Image: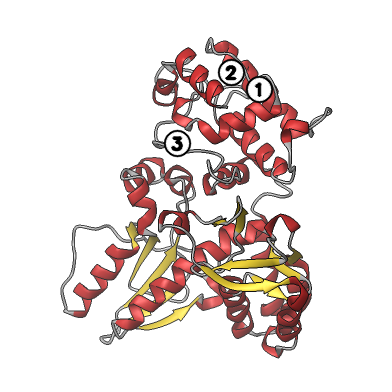
Amino acid sequence: MNGTSQCAREQGSGSSSFASTGAAAGIDTWSAWQGIPLLQTLAQALRVLEREPDLDRFTLPYPAVAQHALDRLSVACLLAGERPPASLAELVARCRDIPLEDWPLHLPAGTAGPGDLLLDPDSGRPTDLCHEWAETGADPAVRHRDRQIVHTALTLCREHGEEGSYSAFRGLLVRRPVLTAADMFEVLGDMLLEPVHDLIRYIYQEVPRSYRRDGAYVQCGRCLTLLTPLGAAEWWCERDRCRRAGPPPVGRVLRETEAGTVLQLERALRQFVTGPGRAEADLEGELRALGLTIEMWPGYDAYDLLVVFPDGLRWAIDVKDWASPYFLGRAAAPVPRNPPYDEAFWVVPRHRVDARPDYQQVYERACENPRTAPALLTDTELVRRARHALRGERIRNLRTSPTSTKEDGNA
């Protein structure tokens, strides 16, 4: 694929300007073969193709979404004077090797950051950004699957009048994304989780053999998701945060002969609930270490953390572990007012801003209504602000979230 990558860069030497100049030139960024819809189709195709072990031997007909992606990218390349991909395998290689800013695409400013890839260059699996693109373009019937599952859990727990059951369910998804047969027996024996027992059986799925090496599955020692074997001895973690922290530490080893069936949360929940949930748990630990009182997912998940200071000051915090600041800005909405609070923030893990220094600026520009959008802090900025508040100091140069009229919780 190195030759293909070089060809694309040489033939499309001006293509990196498409993302920043498309809108200014009056080009339709929503054209099926130019901008946002094309990337959405590509991302959906890559999630489907993730299940195919050998694309070089892939035979026609391609899955419909993959054929659409290949056709639309071919048109985009021809319009830009570039050579289109000759096969599905070559399309996948481009997604792994060429950053989005070098593609012949017309995208709104800030949509693609430096080095953004749809596929991880080491494992060839979809990146966090790819999953976010796929979600934005999914059919309405399947869009935001994680929210559908969480809403179902909310409904079941409310019907039983058990807010503690919902908190236990969210904690399960964050702290135990992988279960053995014995683990599942233990979970289904927990009466606090009784309202969602059937849902738990549904969302934990048998792990594909592609995760197995030498008869064993291995969990990441940081984020607790399953590691993917790379080569003869290396491991790859699906979480961006773990990969940026270095080689994943080996956690629990689940030998098939001892563990029996190994189950993991379906991908959408690992991506949009477990991943952010680890960031929520880390932030909870840092704030508790300051002596603050924390309630996780209060009011049936109205927001992620309710922080109570010794003087009665109350903060509402929603943690948003998104790769794309553009999508996060488009999703900006006031933090629900119930349970009540004095100030509210959206918080993004520091590693997202380290990877993309313009993250907070792109978020602000992408907000449809900047006046009502929550202030966005990194987790380190939030902890620093909490230290100031404990000393009776106030940071006045930061806008906080406005009041929301929304009463129901959100995921």
Cα–Cα gap, marks 1 and 3: 19 Å
Q: Amino acid at mark 2?
A: Ala
For this rendering, which residue is in front, 136 or 214? 214
Sequence-wise first label, 1 or 3: 1
Residue ID at (67%, 49%): 143
Residue 232 horizontal side relative to residue 261, left or right: left
Above or below, 409 against 79 in this view is: below
Residue 267 horizontal side relative to residue 113, left or right: right
- CA neighbours of label 1 inside 10 A, class few (<14), some (14 to 19), many (20+): many
Q: Which mark is residue 76?
A: 2
Classify mark 2: helix, strand or loop.
Answer: helix
Classify mark 3: helix, strand or loop.
Answer: loop
Q: Which mark is residue 270?
A: none
From where the camera sits, is residue 342 visible? yes
Cα–Cα gap, marks 2 and 1: 6 Å
Q: Position of residue 258 (x, y in %)?
A: 75, 78
Q: Quadrant of residue 75?
A: top right
Q: Which mark is residue 111?
A: 3
Disc 2 and disc 1 in contact, CB within 8 angstroms: yes
